[in-house]
Amino acid sequence: MIWAYAGNLSLFGLAAIVLLIYFLRARNLRHDVSAVFLWEQLQFGHRTKLARFRLRLDGILLAQLAGLALLVIATAGPGVRVDQPALSAMAIVIDGSASMSGTTADGRSKEDAARAEAVRILETYPDTPVTVLQWSLDPEILAALGDDHGVARPAIAEFQANWTGDGTVVSLEVLLESQQESRLYERVFLITDHAVADLPTSIPVHVVPISSDGNVLIDVFNVRGQPNGAGVVVFAGVRNDDTRVRETELRVSDGSSRVRLPLVLAPGERQSFVLPFPGAHGVAYTAELTPGDGASFDDIRYNALPQAMPRVGVWFGENDPFLRAAIEVSGPTLWTEEATEAQFAVINGADALHALGGESGRFPSGNLFLVSVAVAPDERRSDQLTADYQTMRAVAVGDPILKGIAPEQLRVDLSSLPDAGQGEMLPEDAVALIVSAGRPILSTGVSETGRWVALVPDLWATNLPFSIDFPLLVANVLAYLVPRVEFVASTPAEPGDAIDLAWAGPEARIVDPMGNLVEGAFGREAGTAGNSGGILMVDTPGFYEVRSPSASVLLASNVAVSESVFVSTLEMGETDRPVGSEMGVLGLWPWFALAACVVLLAEAAAYHGVWAPRRRR
Amino acid sequence: MTRAYDEALFESLAGLRFAVRGRHRGRFEGLHASPRAGVSLEFADYRDYCRGDDIRYVDWKVLGRLDRAVVKTFVREEDRPIHVLVDLSASMGIGSPPKADVAARLAVAISFVALKEFDRVGLCSFSDGLHAQIPPRHGMRQLARILRSLQEAEPSGGTSIDTALGMFAAQSRENGLVFVLSDFLTEQGWQEGLLRLLHRGDQIIAVQILDREDLQPVVEGIAQLVDVETNRSIELTVGPGTRAQYRRLLEKRILDLKRFAARHRMTHVVVPTDLPIGVVFHERFRESGVLS
């Protein structure tokens, strides 16, 4: 038997009032008799002595209690399962998002509750073809549409929530369509712990709600380094979504040391903190609430400081330690001999036209930084410079490459420049950024294979190496040439996100938070949608480690905060009724109410002596 | 106390007559045989003729056959005083209808029957002593007096049958037919009082009026039983077993009275309150020999 309003069974406590009235009334029952001495001559035994303290078998009292019990049962909405005619087809959609890994209001696992509801639906419609779907940002077909419930049951038993967020309505429709047309489902049972808005009216969706326990969560966790390098500052927010006051402790750890913050949170209260962590070092930080609760996924959050990945470069031509140092100062750089793996190439002392045209086949395709364009090596020596220095001038003010640069402070020996015109040194579509005496000093352009920047004069024919603008200029040039991800983002990812790891290089290996090597993150066959080489699909909260030959980088991943927003079943809409209340259940409350009326009428009749034996004459 | 009396009851009682055992001297002429000789239709004896006897009573056939003059004597018929003693103690106020009401109706009916037979009827109410007393008299006006007396009376006080009957025996100067209307539910006994009447020569009819509540109490569960006469109370749980035990005690008490009456040639009649007066007369009184 199932109960629609099981809480009403607590009304059985009213029986205490009935008993109290019974005893109070009996205590004051006076009865006048002609000869009390006859009653006094009775042989008193245990049946007549101390009777007040003993509940006697009183028919009227029993009738009152029975009537009350029947009324209470009727108000609790009893029902029994009944066989239903088979449906044409139905789908059981189980919410597989991270929130389903929590616990229900009665302390059960939400996954267990969802499995039980799914099995209940199967039992209610034993002859209906069914498909079982797991619905989240990473949806899955657990059991294809078929008549055999022997296939659906193991699939339900193996159901487990993942760490991704809630699925979209569109994905639900796609899931259903993958089995058959949506309109052909006679019933779609959606077992979920959250209210779903904008459910399509074309699909007969019946929401089977899963309740949620009270929750305390970390909704914000961020870490920033101190400007002076002394530790970090932690930004954290803790919220109490429970109806009780909760006492907990926030612990922030860098792996070796930690700070603690005791908290007392009122119901619905949110507190945010700026927490200094002076002794912290390292890049990986963890915030954790102790003790945790049923929804453990939001009791712990991960964050990593921004980390730089080395650029991969290849050097052509004569080495220049000043230029190389300026490049490495702008960011860690991994120099390689393999031109095909490089993100950029430095070509010192080459003909721009020749380098960009790639006629020799020696230079790589891609992004090029050209220095000392068309200047013969034997002409590029500082001791050969004359004193004919001219001031430079910016002609493309506002260009990102010139950000922070003051060209008027720079000088160039014009005599070191070749006499040939720009058209002979640089491509025709080159854009001059800095000129001196009408002659291009710094130009940019785009070739068929990538971007290029050309510093025309010999470096030592300028005062650039002695200027504080030189490293800035080099950093700006590299940022222009390699505009893609250069630094690991400081915002943690969420399970279900796809992260482009092309910057890590093909040799990189990824270790997931469990310490397992992620298979197929690289080296997947090209053409696989969204999973070409260098794409990581995050599926677990924690720290992913990207190990490349040059460095190791940590990526933080947290379950989406939206997964911690539970909506109680009471707030759900009209279509969110439990399946049991609408179908497959025969309500018995009218029968119990009728029986209660009959019993109470009989009690009233008995009280007024309707059935008392007639007196004989 | 207001009680109703219907004409139909009196009509049904009109032809009845109380049976009087033995011959008793009366004060006035009546319909009951007296030990004295007198004028009536009932032949009594012969005696020798004496001078002065009325020659109409000389038996001429005996004179012709035996040559001896004898005269016939006849039984004298005199009245028999009927005393109605009504218990109006507080316990008689219990019942539905109250036992006192039934006793009053019964007293009026007995008086009516007696007065119709030219007997003198007197009324005496009692509880723990004698109260109103109406001396025995003839005539229907006596019925009105009895009726008025009963209507004005209210049940109250305790019951002491011995005392009351003793006082009655001392105060009443002539014996007769004594109806004692009571529930006989008293701790102090009734044997002595009845015996005193018996020794005085009264013919005693003990009418025990009991309510259905007395015979088969319906009290159930936890109850405080209060004696209306003494206000003594007892608190107990009454169930079927308790009620059965009570009924056995009451039946024993009724049986004691019945045996006592039989042993002393008294008449004992049990009258439940829900029994109509006419049925009491035509069935109970006739079966027990109260009526002739």
Image (spheres, rainbow, N blue to C red):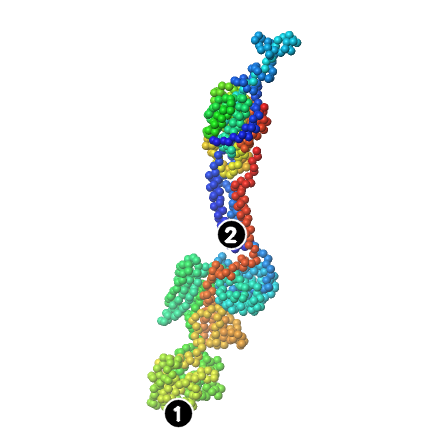
Q: Earlier in the sequence, mark 2 or mark 1?
A: 2
Q: Which residue is denoted by mark 2 in the rendering? A: A75
Place of residue A433 in the rendered image (x, y in percent of width and height, measured from the top left): 39, 84
Chain of the residue that carries numbered disc 2 in the rendered image:
A
- The residue most toward the right is B65
Q: Kindly identify the residue that appears in the image at 47 percent across and 26 percent down.
A: B128
Mark carried by residue A419? 1
In the displayed structure, A361 sits above or below A497; it is below
Chain of the residue that carries numbered disc 1 in the rendered image:
A
In the displayed structure, B273 sits above or below A366; it is above
Place of residue A217 in the rendered image (x, y in percent of width and height, measured from the top left): 44, 63
Q: Amino acid at mark 1?
A: Asp
- B67 vs B282, nearest the viewer: B67
Q: For the residues marked 2 and 1, what is the alpha-carbon distance in whole angstroms?
A: 103 Å
**Judging from the image, what secondary structure is the residue with disc 1 in?**
loop
Disc number lying in front (2 or 1): 2
Badge 1: few (under 14), some or many (20 or more) residues near its Cα, within 10 Å?
Answer: few
Q: Amino acid at mark 2?
A: Thr
- B151 vs B202, nearest the viewer: B151
Residue B74 seen anywhere in this rendered image of the structure: yes
- A310 vs B76, nearest the viewer: B76
**Judging from the image, what secondary structure is the residue with disc 2 in?**
helix
Residue B193 seen anywhere in this rendered image of the structure: no
In the displayed structure, B146 sits above or below A244; it is above
Q: Kindly identify the residue that appears in the image at 59 percent across and 27 percent down.
A: B287
Quadrant (top left, top right, bottom left, bottom right) of the C terminus of chain B:
top right
